[in-house]
Image (cartoon, rainbow, N blue to C red):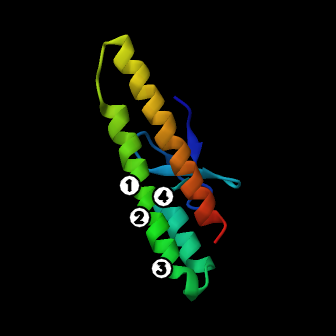
Amino acid sequence: MAEFECYVCKKKVKTGEKFTFTKSGSVHLDCFASLKRKEVSTDKADKLSILVSLLDFELTHLLNILNLQTFSPEAKEMLKTKYKDIEKAAGETTRLISEL
């Protein structure tokens, strides 16, 4: 499994932790949210809060999918497809947060 370092706290991202990728690299969800809270104007704080909550739900969903066990090739393919869909949605949410 690949290893990543959070560009905010400089700690290794461990398996099972919530993290995302930005143009600056990999970042823990909490580090990313904290950094953005310091950067965004007060008029965008509500939007940031909603987007961070949404990203948290998406990353939690990804971790839950990874924990599902199946031996059926069809089920494995379905999980892979759903994982990619949620991963794409999380990437889009990350982009929206980055643009605030």
CA gap between label 2 and label 3 equals 11 Å
Disc 2 to disc 3: CB gap under 8 Å: no
Residue nearest the viewer, comparing 10 with 30: 30
Marks 1 and 4, how far apart in space?
11 Å
| Labels 2, 4: front one | 2
Q: Which residue is mark 3?
A: 46
Spot occupied by residue 87 in the image (x, y as percentages of width and height)? 51, 42
- The picture places residue 29, in percent across and down from the top left corner, at 48, 58
Residue 35 locus on image (x, y percent) = 57, 70
Sequence-first disc among 2 and 3: 3
Q: Residue at x 39, y 27 (%)?
A: 79
Is residue 10 visible from the viewing direction of this image? Answer: no
* Residue displayed at 56% across by 87% down: 42
Mark 2 or mark 4: name the one nearer the start of the chain: 4
Residue at disc 2, secondary structure: helix
> Separation of disc 3 and disc 1 at Cα?
17 Å
Residue at (37% x, 33% y) in the render:
66
| Kind of residue at badge 2 | Ser
N-terminal label among 4 and 3: 4
Per the image, the residue denoted by label 4 is 29
- Do residues under tags 3 and 1 come within 8 Å of each other at their CB atoms? no
Callout 2: few (<14), some (14-19), or many (20+) C-alpha neighbours within 10 Å? some
Distance between mark 1 and mark 2 Cα atoms: 6 Å
Instruction: Examine the rendered structure and indicate whether residue 58 appears above or below residue 34.
Output: above
The kind of residue tagged 3 is Asp
Q: Secondary structure at mark 1?
A: helix
Q: What is the three-letter code of the residue carrying label 4? A: Leu
